Image (cartoon, coloured by chain):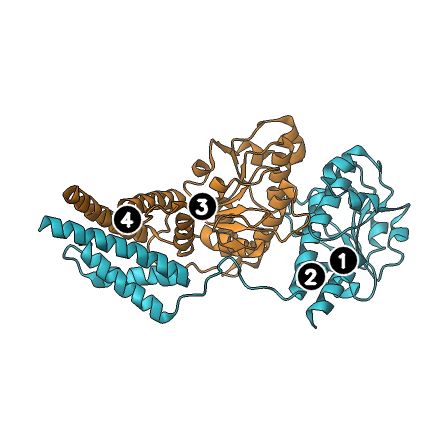
Chain colours: A orange, B cyan
Amino acid sequence: MNSIDVQSSSVVGRERIRFVLVRTSHPGNIGAAARAIRTMGFDRLGLVAPHKFPHPDAVAMASGANGVLEDATIAPALVDAVADCTLVLGCTARARAVQLEELTPREAAARALAASAIGPVAIVFGNERTGLENDELMSCHAAVRIPSMEDFPSLNLAQAVQVLAYELRLAMLAQIPQTADTSKSDPPATAEQLEHLFGHLAQMLDDIDFHKGRSPVTIMKRLRRLFLHAGLDQREVRILRGIFDDAQRMARLARSRCS
Amino acid sequence: MNSIDVQSSSVVGRERIRFVLVRTSHPGNIGAAARAIRTMGFDRLGLVAPHKFPHPDAVAMASGANGVLEDATIAPALVDAVADCTLVLGCTARARAVQLEELTPREAAARALAASAIGPVAIVFGNERTGLENDELMSCHAAVRIPSMEDFPSLNLAQAVQVLAYELRLAMLAQIPQTADTSKSDPPATAEQLEHLFGHLAQMLDDIDFHKGRSPVTIMKRLRRLFLHAGLDQREVRILRGIFDDAQRMARLARSRCS
């Protein structure tokens, strides 16, 4: 790979990596995060329901990274902000009761860079005090945990952004030609397609009376993780949904004749 | 090295690594730096001629890392703050006209950790606007450069501290025997269990009339790859087979009533 190729592929990777801040309380942190990603060569910032934005504190803390703030996209909910993404990674300070694969920042950077060769990637950060809610983590394909101290785990928001942006920059600089999995020829499923798949799966399980009075929540968490880990492409999503359709058809038939 | 040795050497390493902030203008940055090093397991902070300290902004930004602030040492000049150190590393945003070896943060962390086995080590950060003066860099044994963008190189002070503290923490954790991925607590599925799963899946697809005259071979290859890629554990195999059972039950019911 010559230097021109490296340059152009870096640009593609950079443009496809989006830092998403969810329900940020302090506009100063949005500005500091903009500065952090800008120093590391990124410029895509997504904001989900920011408490105050635009705001002079954001501009002050951006310290010249105004372009990042001006181009920031604003969405009402996380699902909207990541709908087009092929990979969504959620940063969390603690292991939660959400069944998500847990990555180190370095692992997350490698995976994000590889995925960015195919489509948009989101790195998601929660509110300063409360982090990501469980339903927001459910929109993520894997969790990223910065290896902080157990007795003092909470990094400042912009500093967590800095650590992830730093690891992403190192991964890009290393530019070990990231080969995407070429055994798959179909485009990867988007976050939106995966959510529809999970919704369909939940409905199907209900229809075939899988739960039998047990709570569906734990099983669905487990199944989400299973399918997220599988790295589904769009054709596989179609196949699975075809299977769900047929199982539902049988359930309807069984019910209509049994009743 | 047994685990007790590792533990005690980590403690020694932590206590021997000192973060030194030189002529810091904003006390909030001192607090944010205290928080940053505390999250990564460090607590030694040295201040050289801080413009304002102690200060309520420092306490506010420390966000609970008060002990680090209370124990901070204050010196009039850098030479005093690092007099007892066996290794002094100075962070600088740009290559300067000082003939110092230049390290990446990762190289610096490895070297600092190795040196901390012998004596105190200082990681030095300059003023927010002007960085380290040339005479201050002369007190350093090597320079550390965070690989920021050439057109926007300047990290916020506390964020630069965060990056170095993060790399030091990774270097320390690398010394401690890592535990395996605990996000999955069930043993992985055996090859035999997987073959039974695929046999069950093929039968279920037949029962719900998924193929509708198409060849099942291609679809089964695809589904095998999908589930093999997911790295199923034994519990997940049981869950999937439970779903297949229920879909088959519905199909039997539908058929018995339809025929």
User: Do the numbered discs 4 and 2 sit on residues whose CB atoms are within 8 Å?
Assistant: no
Q: CA distance from mark 4 to mark 2?
A: 47 Å
Q: Amino acid at mark 4?
A: Arg
Q: Is residue A108 above or below residue B24?
A: below
Looking at the image, can residue B105 be seen? no
CA separation in Å, label 4 and label 1: 53 Å
Tell if the residue under mark 4 belongs to the same chain as the one under mark 2.
no
Q: Are marks 3 and 1 in contact (CB under 8 Å)?
A: no
Secondary structure beneath dot 2 equals: helix
Chain label for disc 2: B
Mark in front: 4 vs 3:
4
Reading the chain from its start, which is encountered first: label 4 or label 3?
3
Which quarter of the rendered picture does the C terminus of chain A lie within?
Answer: top left
* C-alpha span from label 3 to label 2: 34 Å
Q: Which residue is mark 2?
A: B172
What residue is shown with label 4?
Answer: A241
Residue drawn at point x = 36 percent, y = 61 percent: B237
Q: Which residue is mark 3?
A: A120
- Residue type beneath disc 3: Pro
Give residue B124's position: percent from left, percent from top: 79, 51
Q: Nearer the viewer, mark 3 or mark 2?
A: 2
